[in-house]
Image (cartoon, helix red, strand yellow):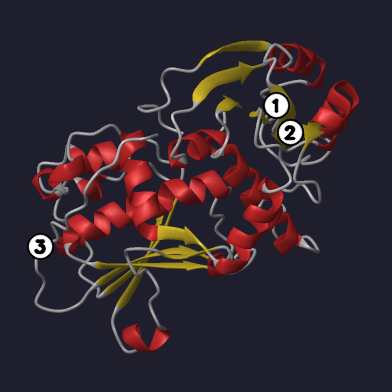
Amino acid sequence: MTAKVRYTDNKPKQSRIQYIIYLCDDGPIPCGGWADRQRGIVGAYLLANVTGRRFGINMTFPSDIKLFYVPNIVNWYIRESEIQGLSKEFLRWIDNRNGPKDVNGDFNVKHPRDVIFLRTNMDIITQIQNSPQYGHLVPETFRNLNRGTVFHTIWHLLMKPSLHFEERIDMFMSKLPRTDELICAHVRMRRNPTIPNDGSQINSLSTVKYLWTFLSKFPNASRVFIATDSIDVRLSAKKYFGSREIDIGGMVLHVDRQGKKPNAVWGFEMALLDQAVLSRCPVLVVSKSGFSCRAAMMSHLDQELYEFNNGTISPYLRLKSEVF
C-alpha cells in the first residue's frame, strides 16, 4: 500500500465531549485475534470521527497495547480521570459481517451515553462510506477510496511502534543482508497441534512443499522469512531452506484463544513482530488470513503479492478491496 493521503478531520462539532473507546480486555466476551482487533480499531475510529466523538483504545489483553504501539498523529490515550462520572454503555459488535444497523441511522440518538465502550472485530469502513447518515462526514481525502487504503491511512494516523518495539524490529532487520531481496510468506493453518482450539484447518502440512518450491524460484533471495501459526510448518521450512530460512522464533500462540497461557505477553510480541516484518517484505505470500493481509495493508512498500491456498500459489490482486 503506497498511496499517500492527506488527512482532514470532518467531525461534526459536539456541545460536550463524548467518546467511543475500542475495548479489548480479559472479560468473558472474546475480542478475536490480532487482525480482528486491527479491523475493529480502524472501524471504531472512523465511527468516532463521523459521530463527533473522541476516540480511545483500551486494549489490555493479553497485555497493554501501548507496550508495542503508541499514539501517532491521533491521540487515542484516554485517562480514566477524563471519563470518571460520565454515563457509559458497552456495545458488542462481533462477527456480524453485514455490520450493525446503527451505522445507517443516528448513532448518537440510539446510543446517547457519553462513553461508548465498543468491542468489535467488524470491518465497517464501506458501510460508513455508504451510510445516508454519515457518508458525507467521512473525510473527503479518503471518502471514495477502497477499504485497504483507508485502513492503511487510519492505521498510521493512530499507530507508531513504541520505542521498545521499534528497537526489536530494527534489531531483527539489521541482521538481514542489504544486497538481496527478503522473500516472505505467512502460512496460516488454523487448527493444528500448536493451536488445537482454532477454527477449522485452511491449509495442510502436506501442501507447504509447493510453497517452498515457489519461494525457491526467486534467485536473489538470500533469506526466506516464514511466519506461521504452526511449529511443524516452521520446522519444515528450516529443513527445506536450511540457513536461508529465518523467523522470529519463540512462542507461537493465538492472542485470543490462548491469551491466558503463561508467557502469553511474549507470544503476543512475537506475533506483532512477525506482522511488522511481513509489512517490510518486497515479496510477500499471504494466506487466507487477516494477519498477513493486514501486514500488506500496513506496508509502505509496493509489494509483489501472492496468495497461498492449500497448495496453490497465485498472484494476489484483490487485497486492496478485500474484507479480512
Mark 2 closeness class: few <14, some 14–19, many ≥20 residues within 10 Å? some
Q: Does residue 256 show up?
A: no
Q: Amino acid at mark 2?
A: Arg
Query: If you read the primary sequence from the N terminus, does the residue marked by circle 2 or circle 3 appear first?
Result: 3
| SS at mark 3 in the image | loop
Query: If you read the primary sequence from the N terminus, does the residue marked by circle 1 or circle 3 appear first?
Result: 3
Q: Residue at x 43, y 40 (%)?
A: 300
Residue 268: % across, % down: 67, 56
User: In the depicted view, which residue is nearer to us: 132 or 183?
Assistant: 183
Residue 143: % across, % down: 17, 40
| SS at mark 2 in the image | loop
Tag 1 and tag 2, C-beta contact below 8 Å: yes
In the image, is 260 to the left or to the right of 16?
A: right
Q: Residue at x 38, y 59 (%)?
A: 158
Disc 2/disc 3 C-alpha distance (Å)? 45 Å
Disc 1/disc 2 C-alpha distance (Å)? 5 Å
Label at residue 201: 1
Residue assigned mark 2: 191
Residue 10: % across, % down: 13, 56
Mark 3 closeness class: few <14, some 14–19, many ≥20 residues within 10 Å? few
Q: Disc 2 vs disc 3: which is toward the camera?
A: 3
Q: Amino acid at mark 3?
A: Pro
Label at residue 171: none
Q: Amino acid at mark 1?
A: Gln
In the image, is 157 to the left or to the right of 266?
A: left
Residue assigned mark 3: 12
Residue 317: % across, % down: 43, 17
